[in-house]
Image (spheres, grey):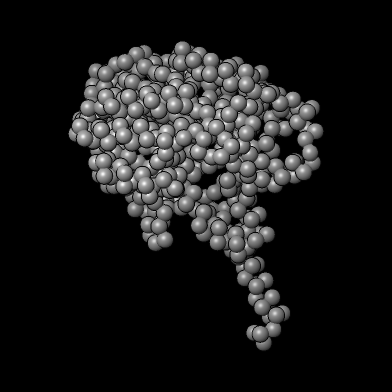
Amino acid sequence: MWTEPTTWGWVLAAIEWTIRFSMLVIVPFRRSPSAAKGWLLLIFFEPILGLLIYWVFGSAKLPAWRCERMAKLPSTFEPVTKRLRGHPNVFHPNVPAELSQAVVLAENLGHMPILGGNAVELLSDYHGSIDRLVADIHAARNHVHLLFYIFADDKTTAPVVDALRQAAQRGVVCRVLVDAMGSRAYLPTLAPKLTNAGVRIEELLPVSLWRWKLARPDLRNHRKIAVIDGHIGYTGSQNLVDPLFKEGITYEELVVRVTGPAVLELQYVFAADWYLETDEVLSGEDTFPGPESAGDVPIQALPSGPTFPASPNQRLLVGLVHAARHRIVLTTPYFVPDEPLLQALQTAVLRGVEVHFVVSEKADQLLVSLAQKSYYEELLEAGAHIHRYRRHFLHAKHVSVDDAIALIGSSNVDMRSFSLNAEITLLFYDAEVAGRLRAEQDRYLKNCKTLVLEDWVKRPWLSKVCENLARLMSPLL
């Protein structure tokens, strides 16, 4: 009987329908409706393959030991926060009343307060930002902390590696965190090179075949942070890699260099990630020195990731869009919004707010690019303005609201950055910084082609089909 093809057909059908019905119960549990629909659609058409993919990628949960260590963070670093609260240069500046709710929302989401006394530089030259970082490493006296999704071993990063080597030789403590998947291609040569130079390098979220230690392959640490001596900090969109590292694409970025008390919030994020990977607590006064006042810009850090249950970057962005009164400019390489953000943007236009998107005409990820384009038509119909940057692949990630608040960091405007990736964003409550960001945005617009609804709807039918099929998978991207 078991050798008959018909019997095996019935067995296979029974297995597939068992999977379908079982996953109807399992998949929606503590998952957004859009993500649940995406998974169930995949499993309905390909039950066995879908089940295997779900087993690897379907749970946003981190290993229990990592969650337990994360839960200990507040108490572990309480001596640091208690000591710094009393420092005369750590103060919470007043902001205009229309910005105060954003400050409260960001603090409740990311547990970081607004800090005054900071100075800010925007760095848009790719090699210039690396040169600036290298110069700061050469001047380091106590420590250098680098956390990057991609840290390559190439000609562009060679000066960084050499600066780290020289710093270590001077007795400067150098610690490097790199994402295990993002930097996977470079670690076989980079890790020995740094280790031999006296630099300590650790992999973030390493993937293991052993289930108890498994980090889901697409749960990644996407942050870009550099902290030198606890007094200078960098973040933004730029990885440590050559701008031509993908064939046919030149990356264009925006990095922010910060001095002042807010650097300690970037340091806290680094120290927390270091602790999660190594169980080593960096809490001394050399790591968290008394801050020096460097300017008058109020800054607030917003970390986010799968260990934050409320999706801080998504909720903050939705809140800012709803609160906007005049103008929003959103620059992102990947735009795959969830329903609340999409509706907030459409509603903002209906309220009379100018909503501008600056996205790249070039693509470095085909499926994401197709899904992204599927949202353009309804946004154009609502009255939003979509500008496609033509010069390079614009990888910069920033938002300005009413020329009063600027957000710059590592987070894209997509469901991956909202739910799966660990990200870092800095909020600048300062019209002058927002004005500098607007100058960058205006520079982009000079190299953009603005979409016109009448032309966009005439794109080929096959393109529309591919875009909307990709959109069905957007919760899984």
Q: Quadrant of residue 235?
A: top left
Q: Is residue 395 above or below residue 19?
A: above
Answer yes or no: is residue 51 visible.
yes
Q: Nearer the viewer, residue 368 or 443?
A: 443
Q: Quadrant of residue 103?
A: top left
Percent from the top left, x then y, of residue 29?
Answer: 54, 53
Q: Quadrant of residue 171?
A: top left
Horizontally, is 31 left or right of 282 in the view?
Answer: right
Q: Is residue 331 above or below residue 298?
A: below
- Kindly identify the residue that appears in the image at 66 percent across and 18 percent down: 352
- Kindly identify the residue that appears in the image at 57 percent across and 35 percent down: 249
Answer yes or no: is residue 303 visible.
no
Percent from the top left, x then y, of residue 416?
Answer: 53, 42
- The quadrant of the image that shows the N terminus is bottom right
Horizontally, is 336 left or right of 408 in the view?
Answer: right
**Which residue is most to the bottom?**
1
- Numbered marks: total: 0
Q: Is residue 377 above or below residue 1?
A: above
Percent from the top left, x then y, of residue 203?
Answer: 36, 47
Percent from the top left, x then y, of residue 361?
Answer: 64, 31
- Kindly identify the residue that appears in the image at 61 percent across and 37 percent down: 363
**Which residue is most to the front?**
155
- Kindly identify the residue that appears in the image at 78 percent across and 33 percent down: 457
